[in-house]
Amino acid sequence: MTNPLDSLVDLTRALGQPAMDYVIIGEGNTSMAVDAESFAIKASGQRMREIAADGFVTVPFAPYLEWLDNPEAPAPELTQPDGLRPSIEASFHAMLLHDCRVNFIGHTHPTAVNQILCSPYAADFAERRRFPDEVVLCGPISLLAPYADPGLPLAIEMRKHLQDFIAQHGEAPKLILLQNHGLIALGDSAGEILNITAMAVKSARIYLGAQQLGGVVSLPEREVYHLYGRPDEIYRRRRFVDENGAE
Ligand SMILES: [Zn+2]
């Protein structure tokens, strides 16, 4: 019998494979909207690479959204009867699943991406694009969130920047980059999360290589938006989602 969490389990294990170098030990977390009221998220301390359905907890959105609006209130107490607790990052997962209306979120700390996010080039990497497939999968621009203490402070800081981003660009980002921390991929399917994460890592490697060859040449902004708005590229983007998002 299939478990409703199967696609989340498969996604989490795929992101956690050591060869990918996206996370080590207990790093990273994933989540999935279960219905309008609740979401499933990796439990605190679970390793992504070997997680099973019992490594996730399903919790309601409401306590987190209320906590974000009223940070002075005590933290929601959502420890499960079996002792599992939601990831410390549950507040930003709740906020992003809700505010961006996506089904899946994957948060990882890839070495290739963090090399740039721990450097003075984080904003240039986030705000510009180098090649067409990066535009197609990761969108025309990523949201760069400044460093904040993991947990509620990070969720509050990210929400402020997210609201500005949506006001400016008219849509939510596909990729959020956290200064000195890692990345968050947002998508409608588990496959989209894998694609965005893989493309962000490839882009980071290209960025690093180009720096070593004398400097990065980014695409002009008009080319980026031309690619993003082309009907054939929109079709291609749609197919990436359809082909990889069986759930
Ligand atoms: Zn993290």
Image: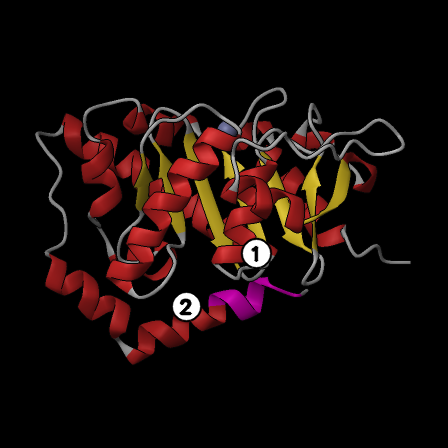
Nearest the eye: 6 or 152: 152
- The answer to whether any part of residue 109 appears in the image is no
Residues marked 2 and 1 touching at CB (< 8 Å): no
Please name the residue shown 83% across and 34% down the image.
80
Return the x and y of residue 68 as percentages of the image width and height: 52, 41
Q: Which residue is at 71% across, 62% downward? A: 35
State whether residue 67 appears in this view. Answer: yes
Task: Report the residue marked by disc 2.
Answer: 237
Q: Is residue 33 left or right of residue 239?
A: right
In the rendered image, residue 6 lying in the magenta stretch gets the answer: no
Q: Tell me which amino acid carries mark 2.
A: Arg
Residue at the extreme bottom of the image, as rendered: 231
Quadrant hosting residue 102 = bottom right
- Image quadrant occupied by the N terminus: bottom right
Residue to which mark 1 is pinned: 191
> From which residue to which does the magenta span run?
240-246
